[in-house]
Amino acid sequence: MKDILKLTVTELSLKLAKRELSSKEVTEAYLRQIADRDERIGAYITVCDGEAIDSAERVDAKRAEGDKLSPLAGIPVGIKDNICTRGLRTTCASRMLKAFVPPYDATVVERLHALGTVTLGKLNMDEFAMGSTTESSYFKKTRNPRSIEYVPGGSSGGSAAAVAADEAPFSLGSDTGGSIRQPASFCGVVGMKPTYGSVSRYGLIAFASSLDQIGPMTKNVCDNALVLNAITGHDRRDATSVSREYGDFTEELALGVKGMKLGLPDEFFGEGINGEVKEAVLGAAKVYERMGAEIVPVSIKMLDYALPAYYVISSAEASSNLARFDGVRYGYRSESYSDITELYKNSRSEGFGTEVKRRIMLGTFALSSGYYDAYYKKALQVRTLVMNDFARVFERCDCILAPVSPTTAYKLGEKSASPLEMYMGDIYTVPVNIAGIPSLSLPCGTDKKGLPIGMQLIGKAFSEATLYRVGNAYETECGVYHLLREGEQYEAY
Amino acid sequence: MKLIKDYELVCGLEVHVELATSTKIFCSCPTTFGAEPNTQCCPVCTGMPGALPVLNRQVVDYAVMAGLATNCRIAGYSKQDRKNYFYPDLPKAYQISQYDLPLCEGGYLEIETEEGKKRIGITRIHIEEDAGKLIHDVRYGTMIDCNRCGVPLIEIVSEPDIRSAEEAVAYVKKLRAVIMYTGVSDCRMNEGSLRCDVNLSVRKKGSEKFGTRTEMKNINSFTFIREAIEYEYKRQVEILEAGGAVVQETRRYDSETGETYSMRTKENANDYRYFPDPDLPPVILTDKEVDALGKAIPRLPDERKAYYTEKYGLSEYDAELLTENKRAADYFESVAEATDYPKLAANMMISELFALLPPDLDEVSIPIEPIHIAALATMAGEGTINSSVAKKLLRRIYETDSDPVKMVEQEGLAQINDAVLLKKYVDEAVAADTKSVTAYKAGNTKAAKAIMGKVMAMTGGRGNPAVINELLEAALLKL
Ligand SMILES: [Zn+2]
């Protein structure tokens, strides 16, 4: 039998159903892998071995009794540490919440539990999801499993690294400005930023409420669709959740791309993009052409404005969302204070890291009286223009093909000195969040250093099934990056 | 103070009213008053990380009803905003309120003043959440009770149309009556479900320009509203007369001393950094929904007042007294329906029943079946019982409610109209009370009253006073 750790969720699901494997065996294999590798990788903040075995045994018992179980029953999962888990520490990788144990599950966790998944632990991230390298975590730095001197990307760096290092068959991340797609591309796994409103945000500790969205990170496209099926749906506890018929995201997987139109936006291949990244994504376009898709040139003129608009909106919302961490009711409280103002000041100064404080100050400034119109209001106007740009483009094509990040993974410490340079790395991912539309990130090559290159397939709202179809066609043609043998390259290369 | 005559008071009120929904504005926690601290809260209303607000639609419905009852325009599109500030009773460190697009705008209420009716403009009504309560304890320090966090409020902002403490009180009374009629709040001031912020400035009479204003927060009784306004008005005039300038600030009214104290000046004022709450979609209302809510509003005080004066011939004054409180008005209407003597019934309620009831009618229900008061009015109107028996019966049924018709029958309380019998009593009384008769003859007409009382006593209080009076006058004239 193929190594358990190399099995996809789809394969595991079949083997569990046929009782060729038990959930306990699978869970134990992953816990062993975590014990062996995670000291080097640093994907997990919290590992729950005991509870994981217990819940695996419960699923096995149910299966033995002949209960009809879901495809995800008994399959282990790693969860980003900004998604609340009842009774299980949820830190946001911050000193502020280093001892916070939520008394409730996020809706996505509730849904997964109802289906019988087994939680392996909580995954490292940039503090409060602010960052692109996972270096701003209070706890540890996560390393890129493809090359240990490099960052895994961020903010869902732990979620990407866990899948890439076979420390979890799939994981949940969150994406506010690229936080699922960029680490997926840096680590060579598949990540989906779903349409805003399709996955409940209840229990996701908010960074920027109007942009945040939880999504799956997996080895391949098919698994991703399967997991998204499980976590999508209306939730009456989230007022921004959209009530509609979502359908089955795996339904169109095998349909191929013949006759489809893929838009290639000029602006995503301009100044600042690394040559190898550009070449790989254009190579993918060639693959699609070969498979019978038509490549059409399109234009997102507002691309340059999306980035500053994103930083204004996300920081403004963050400044308000993070105000509740004041040391009064829960979370970190400073030892030294003589009155309530000092308690606030000292707890927040000591509890938050530099990047978080930078964004809170940025956002507070942008919302201040006298500056609101110039920054926040302007940013909202840009947001509308970006949405219009995408709407126009989707009249001409089924989805957009673009790079995820201008470069491959950075070396650890390389970008931490220059926040602005790091922010520039989000240029291709943030427009998607600004517009609230879905985007699938999947590997499309490797650079000379052996680091994965990612492409993203961007679609109109609620077109996830189409994106999976297009993504799956590529994997069918070129193979699943994560499962390629050492040194093996995509055929297209 | 002579100088005060040269100045004009300019006042606007912000009234916070707690809505009578059974659950909170953004979660399903109950809103019951007086529960043990922190027993009515959940991750949402305590602002736990990741918890999200979902608007209770009944809050919108109630706010719209309050808006319609105060003649406001209802916005088809409004939104909710975050008001950001740090305070330990505010778990999220922002209050969800409405900033530039409130639910209701441009209304008014009419009040009675010495110069007649006056219109007080209502700028806006918006929905928002209440904060928690801080409990200061010598042993444990300051503690937070989150039961009130997320209790739904409406804030009703008036135009600066108020020119005296009396007008302010009349406005709040009218507003309270109207809101209570709609049933969207119980407006209990002692429980804080109606609280008032007073904005006040003064200016030289005839001046168009507004003076610098101060704000007094959380005043919760009519007496305190009056006292706070009178004190603050005088304070500001004295400052101006002494050549000083009023400082724009928030002041605290101390009901113990009747004075106001500076709390926070404008320089230290918070910049609330309002912005649209990204967790909450806009509030959309169709004309159809607004119409349906309008239909759900019961008839309001002014409409009822007009009806009472026209249909039942009540005076404006009596009609006002009966409509000040919805419970009384509803009660009166049930009574009026069951008797041919509604005006008599109204008099009984106002002069007798209201005297028996506690001053704040909102706290208790009237312990008499309306049909029993109606029966009393009918018996009195038809002459079956006299007014003093009616009065006594009313007091008795107030203690233990029962059918007065039966009581009259069983206890033989019917009025004695028999002139022959009454003449016998009159003659006996006149013969017995020579002292009063002498006094009467000497010109003391009041002495007849004493004889009258004795006759009444002889009838067991049941004699027809008009007949007795006639017979007595005749008897005395003959002497
Ligand atoms: Zn609650």
Image (cartoon, helix red, strand yellow):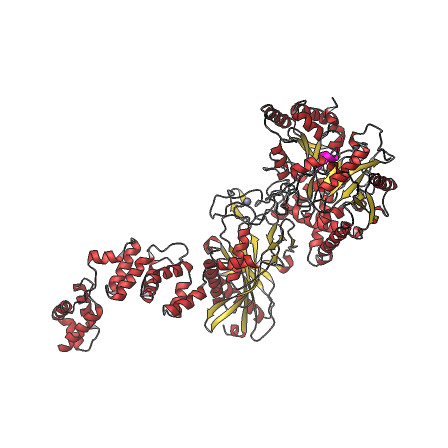
Q: Is residue A218 magenta?
A: yes
Is B119 situated above or below B401? below
Q: Nearer the viewer, residue B279 or A325?
A: B279
Please state the horizontal and vertical placement of residue B151, each as a whole percent of the image. Answer: 53, 50
Q: Nearer the viewer, residue B175 or B285?
A: B285
Where residue B418 sits, quadrant-wise, is: bottom left
The residue range painted magenta reads A215-222
**Residue furthest to the front:** A259
Q: Nearer the viewer, residue A42 or B279?
A: B279
Is A19 situated above or below A372? above
Work out which quarter of the rendered image holds the C terminus of chain B and state it.
Answer: bottom left
| Quadrant of the rendered image holding ligand 1 | top right
Where residue A327 sits, quadrant-wise, is: top right
Please state the horizontal and vertical placement of residue A115, each as a whole percent of the image. Answer: 62, 33
Would residue B217 be seen by someone viewing this image from the given angle? no
Q: Is residue B360 left or right of residue A98?
A: left
Please state the horizontal and vertical placement of residue B177, each as a whole percent of the image. Answer: 46, 61
Q: Is residue A176 magenta?
A: no
Would residue B48 be seen by someone viewing this image from the given angle? yes
Where residue B311 sits, quadrant-wise, is: bottom left
